[in-house]
């Protein structure tokens, strides 16, 4: 079996406000009253994604795909770790229009993995442990999105070159519907994993996507140790998504954490700190000195600043 190359693929900047546009497509209408950022500067979360991927996995390359080049202090710091690749976002697939930047990114990541193989990481992930054990197996790898969810999260994927699973997945875009957010992104790979279990390893949800994107999880992850106020969640939500957080989470099973930065920033930070936007709160000084779960995991990647 072919070993997975230790190359990392990250996508950002398919639109001038890519991170925000991707988020707006994902969340419900109730969250969309949040104010759009004035600019699309490359923030500290994106830097941490690249720096942690570099330090933890020691990849041969970090390929960074973009249409609109980012800017700002953190982009300047990140460039020494990456190989930038300018791309034109696909506007259609098999004759089906793709208007969502998030769905365009879905197609680009699959095509990159088929063509070159390697590790795909969303631009808001934090690597904690080397992904070497999965590289050796040479199979396509995805993680569950929640303990009992019938979805596989495409924020973290590993693939050999010319993966049969990835090619089957992409071929199913013949019936792609741009209005269906989850259909081809996270629901289809779950269905295909049941049809082709020999072509994919589906790993424990805590490996790549824990905590989840519930407000309960995000408040604990970003705010516990400051002014954490737990949210009440119905039994239905917990049952559907799986997994209730405890205050003694140690992340010992986590290889990568998906930071769900869009929702955590625009919903939780603005909700609790209406006069204290994310760019004022998420600083190097705060990450170094305030002991939230996120800060304790992230600060080691800022030691050389």
Image (cartoon, grey):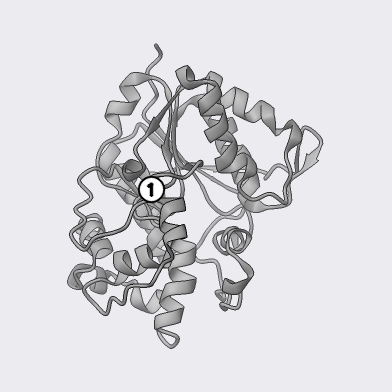
**Total numbered labels placed on residues in the image:** 1
As drawn, the residue found furthest toward the right would be 95
As drawn, the residue found furthest toward the bottom would be 275
Q: Nearer the viewer, residue 50 or 304?
A: 50
Instruction: Report the quarter where the C terminus lies.
Output: bottom left
**Relative to 238, does residue 8 appear above or below in the rendering?**
above
Q: Secondary structure at mark 1?
A: loop
Quadrant in the rendering for residue 44: bottom left
Give the left or right position of residue 228, taking residue 87 as reference.
left
Residue at (45%, 79%) from the top-left corner?
Answer: 270
Quadrant in the rendering for residue 156: top left
Quadrant in the rendering for residue 261: bottom left
The image shows residue 188 at horizontal and vertical percentages of 59, 36
As drawn, the residue found furthest toward the top would be 1
Whether residue 117 can be seen here: yes
The image shows residue 53 at horizontal and vertical percentages of 33, 44
Q: Residues within 10 Å of mark 1 (few under 14, many from 20)?
A: many
Give the left or right position of residue 298, taking residue 179 as reference.
left
**Relative to 79, does residue 197 appear above or below in the rendering?**
above
Residue at (38%, 48%) from the top-left corner?
Answer: 209
Q: Nearer the viewer, residue 288 or 28?
A: 28
The image shows residue 17 at horizontal and vertical percentages of 60, 63
Residue at (37%, 72%) from the top-left corner?
Answer: 231
Instruction: Determine which residue is flagged by label 1.
Output: 209
The image shows residue 31 at horizontal and vertical percentages of 57, 72
Instruction: Report the quarter where the N terminus lies.
Output: top left
Give the left or right position of residue 33, taking residue 78 as reference.
right
Residue at (26%, 46%) from the top-left corner?
Answer: 128
**Relative to 134, does residue 2 appear above or below in the rendering?**
above
Whether residue 260 can be seen here: no
């Amino acid at each position: 079996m072919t070993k997975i190359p230790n190359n990392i693929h990250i996508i950002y900047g398919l639109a001038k406000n890519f991170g925000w546009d991707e988020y707006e497509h994902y969340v419900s209408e109730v969250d969309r009253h949040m104010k759009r950022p004035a600019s699309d500067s490359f923030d500290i979360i994106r830097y941490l994604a690249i720096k942690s991927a570099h330090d933890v996995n020691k990849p041969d390359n970090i390929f960074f795909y973009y249409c609109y080049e980012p800017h700002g202090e953190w982009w300047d710091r990140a460039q020494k770790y990456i190989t930038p690749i300018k791309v034109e976002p696909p506007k259609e697939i098999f004759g089906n229009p793709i208007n969502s930047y998030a769905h365009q990114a879905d197609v680009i990541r699959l095509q990159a993995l088929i063509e070159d193989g390697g590790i795909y990481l969303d631009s808001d992930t934090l690597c904690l442990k080397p992904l070497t054990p999965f590289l050796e197996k040479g199979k396509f790898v995805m993680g569950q999105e929640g303990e009992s969810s019938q979805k596989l999260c495409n924020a973290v994927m590993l693939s050999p070159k010319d993966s049969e699973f990835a090619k089957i997945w992409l071929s199913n875009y013949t019936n792609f519907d741009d209005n269906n957010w989850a259909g081809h992104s996270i629901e289809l790979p779950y269905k295909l994993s049941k049809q082709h279990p020999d072509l994919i390893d589906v790993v424990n949800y805590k490996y790549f996507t824990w905590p989840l994107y519930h407000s309960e999880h995000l408040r604990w992850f970003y705010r516990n140790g400051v002014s954490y106020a737990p949210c009440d969640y119905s039994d239905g939500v917990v049952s559907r998504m799986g997994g209730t957080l405890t205050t003694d989470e140690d992340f010992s099973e986590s290889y990568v954490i998906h930071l769900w930065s869009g929702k955590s920033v625009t919903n939780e930070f603005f909700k609790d700190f209406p006069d204290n936007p994310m760019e004022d709160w998420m600083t190097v000084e705060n990450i170094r000195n305030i002991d939230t779960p996120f800060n304790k995991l992230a600060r080691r990647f800022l030691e050389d600043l």
